[in-house]
Amino acid sequence: MEIKPPGHEFKSSLGQSPGRSTVALETIFYNDYAPIYYPLINFSSLLKAHIDIGPSEEQLEEEEEDETSQYGQNVSKLVAACSNVGFMYLSNSSVSAISCAHLRVPTFYNLTELFLGDINGHGWALLPHLLESAPNLEILAFMEGFSEYTGCYAKFQNSLQHCVPTCVSSRIRDIFFEEFNGEGDEFDLVEYFLKTGQVMTKMEFSFSSSLPLEKQYSTWTKLLLMQKGTKTCRVEFRKEVTVNVVTFCLLELFLGDINGHGWALLPHLLESAPNLEILAFMEGFSEYTGCYAKFQNSLQHCVPTCVSSRIRDIFFEEFNGEGDEFDLVEYFLKTGQVMTKMEFSFSSSLPLEKQYSTWTKLLLMQKGTKTCRVEFRKEVTVNVVTFCLLGDENESQPRD
């Protein structure tokens, strides 16, 4: 636990209750298991409270139901002692303890920022009481998302009074949803706030990192459509959400010079763009030896969706005819089931003889696919024809 008075800082050891205080405290950071009792504490000057306490698993297993309830009541009393704060964070265990204590939540007249941890079933049921007890709340943040969904919005509704909490209808400006999973009950809660929050200006989302790209896209779309129900509130997304959604929608991907890092990253780019239709390597490959192995090692066990069923055209610029490049071409030709065209230009430094052998090898590789045409830029065709003509001319000249 960490307690900070103006200009001072106190720390107490884990498991030790905060003692009687005569100092005007401003901030308390309490992260611990709930003790059996708390001594009298003066928190009247407290401005910020970060409370992450609750009974441990051992306490829940070993203690009788009455004693477990006592732990919850102790947490509730500690939170009640912080009723003058302007900022409060309550963890999952703290919210659960308060909910199980069945004590009336005091009114937090000064509270303008409420940050909540992972919300379980107890959290859904307690949320209306927290909102009703904070009439001047301006910022509400769900910092760790929701760990329970099914039937939980019903718990929220059942705990609501007949009228909308004052802070929701006339005070809350910003709501933050972290680790959003796009579940039905979450959408219901979002819709409730959008419909009842008359002065709300921003609702911001980040998505759970385990959420598949396709579901991120559908969730993003649904949230934007829900925004139409309000004239004042903007639905916004964290940068990483926007990047993921844009990648999912990506139809054309143009890449610069590919080095060793690029070979390793390429599978991830392909896997994150399931709707990709055009892929272009605009500046060729600056590294080759052992690089196709990097590509293979980064691949998942299955072929990326875009490769097997979406990509139509692939463009290889500045092709050098190296072994790893041919391996990559062969991979796309074998796995690209709907690909119709693969077009090449050669590096200008490539000797005519190697251009010809590369051209020949690529045309032979085309036989592995029934749908894809291997094509070449005009200058490649000119160079190959020139090489063939020069060869014929040399053969036709009389020998000495």
Image (cartoon, helix red, strand yellow):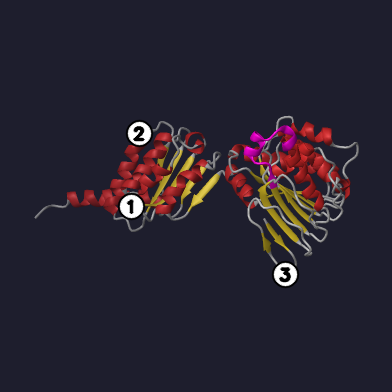
Residue type at mark 2: give it.
Lys
Residue at 43%, 41% in the rendered image: 299
Tell which tag, 2 or 3, sits nearer the viewer: 3
Precedes in sequence: disc 3 or disc 1: 3
307 vs 90, left or right, is left
Tell which tag, 1 or 2, sits nearer the viewer: 2
170 vs 14, left or right, is right
Q: Which residues are magenta?
A: 53-68
Residue placed furthest toward the bottom = 7
Residue type at mark 3: give it.
Gly
**Is disc 2 surrounded by few (<14), some (14 to 19) or many (20+) residues within 10 Å?**
few
**Is disc 3 surrounded by few (<14), some (14 to 19) or many (20+) residues within 10 Å?**
few
Q: Quadrant of residue 73?
A: top right
Precedes in sequence: disc 1 or disc 2: 2
Which of 121 and 100 lies nearest the eye of the viewer?
A: 100
Callout 1–callout 2 Cβ contact below 8 Å: no
| Residue at mark 1 | 383
SS for dot 3: loop
| Residue at mark 2 | 367
